[in-house]
Amino acid sequence: MPRQRQQILDNLDAVYREAYDRAEQATDARLMADLDAAYQREQLLLEVLLDIRDALAVPAAPRAAAPDPVGALETIRRITRLR
């Protein structure tokens, strides 16, 4: 069973939040800006992939019932009696 969309996005957020907090503690403004841009890019890509996953996971349309050979023979017999 695939993971829920929100769980995946929350995991992404946690990974970037941890790295961003470390960069913030190190007062590395350049790294913070890079992480912010990377997070936005990764989030967008991940959402597209999740949309594709959701679209492909749509259950197939139900199949028509298998033909009933005995029923078909009965129908043929009834038709031939009418003639």
Image (cartoon, rainbow, N blue to C red):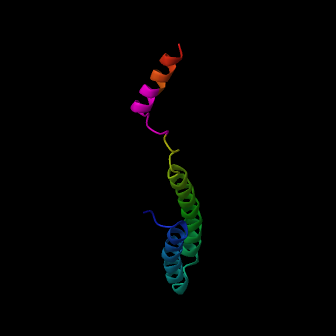
Residue at image coords 49%, 77%: 19
Residue at image coords 50%, 54%: 53
Is 68 magenta? The answer is yes
Residue 30 coordinates in the image, percent (x, y): 57, 73
- Viewer-side residue, 38 vs 23: 38
Residue 47 coordinates in the image, percent (x, y): 57, 60
Residue at image coords 53%, 78%: 17
- Viewer-side residue, 55 vs 73: 73
Q: Residue furthest top?
A: 83
* Range of residues picked out in magenta: 64-74
Q: How many marks?
A: 0
Vertical relation: 75 (above or below) 12: above
Residue 78 coordinates in the image, percent (x, y): 49, 23
Residue 75 coordinates in the image, percent (x, y): 48, 26
Vertical relation: 19 (above or below) 49: below
Q: Name the quadrant containing residue 6.
A: bottom right
Q: Quadrant of the N terminus?
A: bottom left
Is 3 magenta? The answer is no
Vertical relation: 8 (above or below) 26: above
Q: Name the quadrant containing residue 38.
A: bottom right
Residue at image coords 49%, 73%: 11
- Viewer-side residue, 18 vs 51: 51
Q: Residue furthest bottom?
A: 25
